[in-house]
Amino acid sequence: NVGQRWGRVIIPCEETGGLSVDVVDLIDLAGPRHSHPGGEVCMVMPITPEAQFDGTSRGWCVFEPGSAHNPTVTNGEALILYMLPDGKIDFTDKK
């Protein structure tokens, strides 16, 4: 997809406490809607100084278990490193 690159860099394992580690690069884009069965912890790293991920300009944001969203970067480009318990994420086509 234009404006989106994604990859799983670490699969869930004992060394990570069962967390997967993924990285996504988003440029002014709302990504696919998904939910977090076990929650999600994100580290936001703006490439464009004004870029925001779901309203966070840089640093950490946490989504509780069962939460859902369309991951959205506005005002430029940002890298988001995110961790998922057991690597679980549920994608849906609902807006």
Image (cartoon, rainbow, N blue to C red):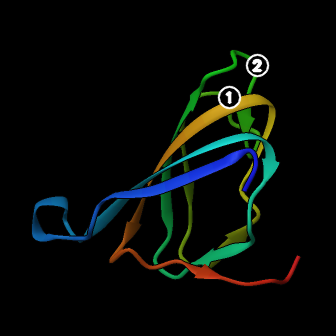
- Residue at left 68%, top 28%? 57
Q: Is residue 38 left or right of residue 32?
A: left
What amino acid is found at the position of numbered circle 2 in the picture? Answer: Glu
Q: Amino acid at mark 1?
A: Ser
Mark 2 touching mark 1, by CB under 8 A?
Answer: yes
Q: Where is 39 relative to 31, above or below?
A: below
Q: Which element type, helix, strand or loop, lies under badge 2?
A: loop
Q: Is residue 72 above or below residue 57?
A: below
Residue shown at 69%/19% (left/top)? 48
* Quarter where residue 21 is shown: bottom left
Q: Height in image: 21 above or below 29?
A: below
Residue 83 percent across, percent down from the top left = 40, 58
Label of residue 57 in the image: 1
Report the residue at 63% width, 33% height from top. Answer: 78
Residue that numbered label 2 is attached to: 50
Distance from the alpha carbon under mark 2 to that under mark 1: 7 Å
Q: Position of residue 88 (x, y in %)?
A: 44, 79
